[in-house]
Amino acid sequence: MNTHLLALQLMAVQGCLGAFDTLYHHELTEALPGRASARLELRIHALRSVIYCAMYVGLACWRFNGLWAVALLLVFAVEIGLTLWDFVVEDQTRLLPATERVTHTVLTLNGGAFIALLALNAGESMTLPTALAWEPHGLLSAFLLLCGAGVGLSGVRDAFAARALARQAARPQPPALRFGATGCAVLLTGATGFIGQKLVRALLADGHRVTLLSRQPRAAAWLFDGRVECVNDLAQLPPARRIDVVINLAGARILGWRWSEARQAALRVSRIGLTRKVVSWIAAADHKPALMLSASAIGYYGIQARGDDTVLTESDAPQPMFMSDLCREWEEAAGTAAAYGVRVACMRFGLVLGTQGALPMMLLPVKLGMGGPLGDGRQWLSWIHVDDVIAGIAHLWTSGEGGAYNFTAPESLPQAGFNRVAAKVLKRPYWLPTPGWPMRLALGEQADLLLEGQRVAPAKLLASGFAFRHPTLAGALASLS
């Protein structure tokens, strides 16, 4: 058996597993690049990625002989040390989901196998003259080189993310928010999303008692250091339980698989179905909450034809299309709480800018120097900084009015203008257009979220006296970079 070739094959498997772990866990479900507590973990990942990049590129087509074999053994030792350090840091800073734990176990076993095989071959290689002997393996070598490039880019991504988080930590923090009378009992859904995480910490800092409804209560409790109560079913809250304010942010990620009938049904259940359950709990509660703040989105307005510069406000009507129907039904479900004397305010979110959420992936092409318009770039993009979202929630808490509110900044831009400003803030070129038809082909109607838009103004927030901390895109992006 050619154990060296077997080791390279196991390295290829490691590359596939590592790509899955990075894309699905680190980027999608855990969103590590935007999580302040993951700064050290990201630095370790960046160092490991440099080592793996060198290993993949070096071993793809060359055999390490003599002193090069000794150097390879030293690299293995460093990698093992970094892996163990990574495990310790992960366990100290976050509760890993089951799929990530399983993936890490498989990665560890597979990595140990290929390192052991290469180490066994190193004994013979050390007896040979020092050299990098050319030894390509066809398509396998090509795939290993591809893995090396991918893990290298991942390392760059993690290094930039760690640096950005360090800058964020060094910046002066915004003043603490007041959410009305201290000591209110708050029931919150969607707390583990990036808006929810910031909101929970702001509520705790203001002295409120927070109860979270979460499908993973143990992970949610870990996320907030055990300072919140977590339940996975509203039945765990008896009718006698006093809740003063309900904040409903829950909803499955809208951008993902195509909007098939099954996917549309799942999105409705996660938004409308859950909201109805919350209202049913309110109906049965002995003490009715004074306020319910419920999430919605500017998808309520449907899409705006490119070239149409009309400014949309809360008085504009929805359109007969899925994204519009979803938001309308979501708001209607929340509105039924008004029958029990609850003041209901629906927050129609635009694109929320923060170190988590959609923005990091949107800015990645710009950071790599490949920024440019998406599609024809004329679609309107209405956005809001996450700090203004939290401040807006505090404002509605005390404003005394219900109804729908657009949570967007006063400044909206065409998508091309958005990327042009981002490139200027990040000091990157703006030159490479991205065609829209591949997204349309892959995502179907869902592509409207990226290729169409709405020019939405926060008319009611401004009329009620709310002052935006980040009214312009350049300032908002600068605060996050």
Image: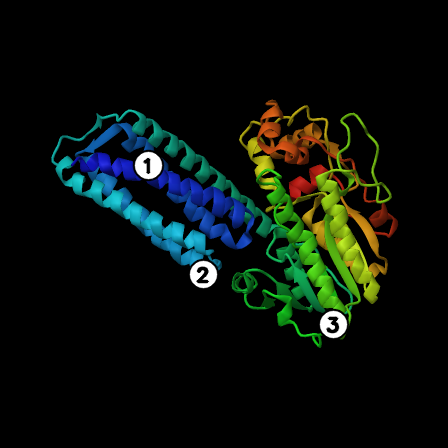
394 w.r.t. 268: above or below: below
Q: Amino acid at mark 1?
A: Ala
Q: Position of residue 125 (x, y in %)?
A: 15, 35
From the image, state whether disc 3 or disc 2 is nearer to you.
3
Q: Secondary structure at mark 3?
A: loop
Residue in the foreground of this view, choosing between 182 and 66: 182
Q: Which mark is residue 92?
A: 2
Mark 2 surroundings within 10 Å by alpha-carbon count, few (fewer than 14), some (14 through 19), many (20 or more): few
Residue in the foreground of this view, choosing between 32 and 469: 32
From the image, state whether disc 3 or disc 1 is nearer to you.
3
Q: Position of residue 55 (x, y in %)?
A: 31, 36
Mark 3 surroundings within 10 Å by alpha-carbon count, few (fewer than 14), some (14 through 19), many (20 or more): some
Q: Is residue 349 visible?
A: no
From the image, tell me which residue sits under label 1: 12
Q: Is residue 301 visible?
A: yes
From the image, state whether disc 1 or disc 2 is nearer to you.
1
Q: Residue shown at 80%/59% (left/top)? A: 336
Give the spatial CA distance, label 1 vs label 2.
Answer: 30 Å
Decide if residue 119 is on the left or right side of residue 22. left
Q: Amino acid at mark 2?
A: Gln
Q: Amino acid at mark 3?
A: Ala
Q: Are marks 3 and 2 in contact (CB under 8 Å)?
A: no
From the image, tell me which residue sits under label 3: 285
Q: Residue shown at 58%/41% (left/top)? A: 256
Give the spatial CA distance, label 3 vs label 1.
Answer: 57 Å
372 w.r.t. 350: above or below: above
Q: Residue shown at 60%/29% (left/top)? A: 439
**Image quadrant where residue 239 sits:** bottom right
Decide if residue 332 is on the left or right side of residue 192. right
